[in-house]
Image (tube, rainbow, N blue to C red):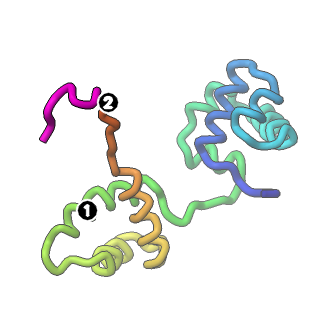
Amino acid sequence: MANQILSMNKLHLNLRLLIEGKSRRYISRTVSFSRNTVDKYAVLFGTQPYSLTELYKLPEGELHEIVQPGYKPKVSQLQLQEHFNLAVKELKKVGITKQHLWGNYKAEHTNSPGYSQYCHHFKKYLKSQELSFVFDHKAGDKLMD
């Protein structure tokens, strides 16, 4: 996992724990990456003109630019989330396919993912929308239909 950028969740968690004054070893265990990586990001954040709190409040794109200069994400996850919210409703209509929805998305966004990546992200989105509930009950206590 050398020289890979951390997810934004891990970067924000790393920043929050640094703000709270936690030890590098504790941060390493909590975020589950090496102490050298914690040190690397601590030094990188320390060289910025912003305080740690200001860095924590920065938008995702700006923080990504600080951590990995010149990095431009291919597609914004927020754009895809908004599109997938509408796509779920559209797929219920007769004659609408994922291929059709992807074509429309690609026409609107020039830096959109290919069809296979679009389907992969859509599948992850659908999985994240599944809800489940564990219903605790005593056997024979009530009659349920």
In the image, what residue occupies the spot 32% across and 39% down?
133
Residue 14 falls in which quadrant of the image? top right
Pointers 2 and 1 in contact (C-beta within 8 Å):
no
Q: Horizontally, is 30 left or right of 76 in the view?
A: right
Residue 31 falls in which quadrant of the image? top right
Q: Nearer the viewer, residue 31 or 114?
A: 31
> Residue 139 lies in magenta, yes or no?
yes
Q: Quadrant of the C terminus?
A: top left
Q: Which residues are magenta?
A: 136-145
Q: Residue furthest right?
A: 36
Dot 2, crowdedness within 10 Å: few (<14), some or many (≥20)?
Answer: few
Whole-percent x, y for residue 105 in the image = 34, 71
Which residue bears the numbered disc 1? 88
Whole-percent x, y for residue 77 in the image = 46, 56
Task: State the SS at label 1.
Answer: helix
Task: State the SS at label 2.
Answer: loop
Q: Horizontally, is 54 left or right of 115 in the view?
A: right
Q: Nearer the viewer, residue 41 or 34?
A: 34
Q: Nearer the viewer, residue 135 or 18?
A: 135
Q: Nearer the viewer, residue 116 or 110?
A: 116
Question: What secondary structure prevails in the magenta region?
Answer: loop
Q: Residue furthest front?
A: 140
Which residue bears the numbered disc 2? 136
Question: Up-down: is 119 above or below 27?
Answer: below
